[in-house]
Amino acid sequence: MSCSEALRVQEYFDGELDAGAAADVERHLETCAECAALLKDLELTRAGLRESGPYYRASDALRARIADILDDESGERPARRPARIGKGFLWGALSGGGATALAAAFAALLFLPAAPNLAVDDLTNAHLRSMMSDHLIDVVSSDRHTVKPWFAGHTDVSPPAVDFAKDGYTLIGGRADYVDGHRAAVVVYRHGKHIINVFAWIAGDEHLPAEALRNGYHLVFWKSGNIAYCAVSDTGLDEIATLTHLIQNAGAPVSRE
Amino acid sequence: MSDRRRRFETQALPHLDAAYNLAKWLARPPLDADDIVQDAMLRAYRAFDSFRGDNVKPWLLSIVRNCFLTAAGQTRHTRNVPLPADGEVGSDDPALVVDAPDPEAAAIRAEEGRRLADVVAKLPPEFREVLVLREMEDLSYREIAQITGSPIGTVMSRLARARGMLKEKWQSDVEGAGHVLQ
């Protein structure tokens, strides 16, 4: 690439530019065939890497060894544990002898994913899918008056889509997805570098945990009326909980619109 | 459970896969990604009380990278990171995860994944790492600069080179890549 704007195009592609600079690059792309081709190549290599490229995940054996190491470090090693089931650090979490109520609650939280739950798997997979493909957002908007009506035409439910940018949770759009046999509406937020997908669907009689942790992703569930919600993200549980509280508190006024 | 342990499990352990993925892409035999990650998690845990910031992932990955360089320095006479041998990507590694909806597509994806892994593995390490951090971990330039200890300008130019090399090699080395990169 010899065009002097090539690095700017890359910055644009990587979302590193502010709106003004991005608009400049977009204007440049309209007239520079070289940079337009570069952008296409960037998209193709990313799609290839994210969709076909291997991603190596830590084995259960490694997780177990790390849990052991942390036990040793924290002086929390109990009597030798029996053969491990599932992720090792779950057992590590349970091993604290004089567990406070907080630690116990936390262990219970960690222990939830051990029970098979199709909804949890499905939601985690839907979240992963959205992160790995171009299908993160169907309707791009930070305006609830755009997102909420869009849901009405594309999904079974029309959950509140409120922007909480001033609290650090920016509404970036919405998407239709299919989760556990339901047509779900997904409200997508950005928090720092993290994406939080908030799934909403018509609640059935499925049993949903309050919280779950699957493959490093936190899931927080709640119900409001006949709608079930689940917020999924790789950000911290506290950060997700803050957003769910904002949504729960904002839900009422928005639904009157 | 100690407060440090609790915070470590909620804030650092969710990034264990990212730590492992980076180690796996960097390490070549006789280096073992498991050993590197284990070492890194222990160091991270010991240092966790002094960690100030709200972004654990780049902090953790920079520790993984340092552990890799330390391990590489101990097993090599040069300080250069070893280049991979041709075709050495561990294609049969059970940890190699390829998501695809149906078996046929899964087979095609797996094959593409192996070829792609091969091409990425042949990139010089300083290019390989920025590519992994940007495209697989979705980290910002600033975060990648923090992890690799390079200026942002260096991250940008390496990333551009890495992408250019990847595209070129993928097209020239790989038979049948035409349907991926047209």
Image (cartoon, helix red, strand yellow):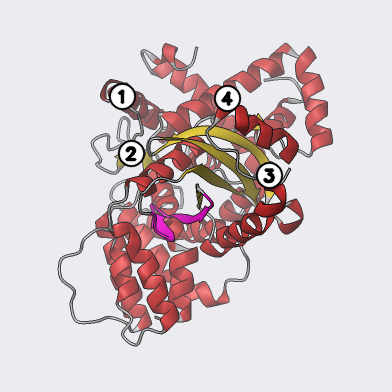
2 and 1 marks on the same chain = yes
Q: Residue at x 38, y 77 (%)?
A: A104
Q: Earlier in the sequence, mark 4 or mark 3?
A: 4
Pointers 4 and 2 in contact (CB under 8 A)?
Answer: no
* Residue that carries the numbered disc 3 in the rendered image: A171
Looking at the rendered structure, the secondary structure element under dot 2 is strand
Q: Which residue is mark 1?
A: B111
Report the residue at 67% width, 46% height from top.
A255
Which circle, 4 or 3, is nearer the viewer? 3
Q: Position of residue B66 (x, y in %)?
A: 48, 59
Q: Nearer the viewer, residue A243 or B63?
A: A243
The residue carrying mark 4 is A43
In the rendered image, the vertical position of residue B107 relative to residue A101, given as above or below: above
Q: Residue at x 80, y 20 (%)?
A: A28
Amino acid at the residue labelled 4:
Glu
Is residue B27 in view from this perspective?
no
Spatial CA span between label 1 and label 4 = 20 Å
Q: Position of residue B141 (x, y in %)?
A: 65, 45
Q: Around disc 2, counting alpha carbons within 10 Å, would you say few (fewer than 14), some (14 to 19), or many (20 or more)?
A: some
- Give the numbered dot on residue B87: none
Question: For the magenta stretch, what is the residue range?
Answer: A208-225
Dot 4 lies on which element?
A: helix
According to the image, label 2 marks what residue?
Answer: B97
Query: Residue A12's x, y, as percent?
Result: 71, 32
Numbered disc in front, either 2 or 1: 2
Tag 3: residue type? Answer: Leu
Q: Residues within 10 Å of mark 1 (few under 14, many from 20)?
A: some
Distance (Cα) linking label 3 and label 2: 31 Å
Q: CA distance from mark 4 to mark 2?
A: 22 Å
| Tag 2–tag 1 contact (CB < 8 Å) | no
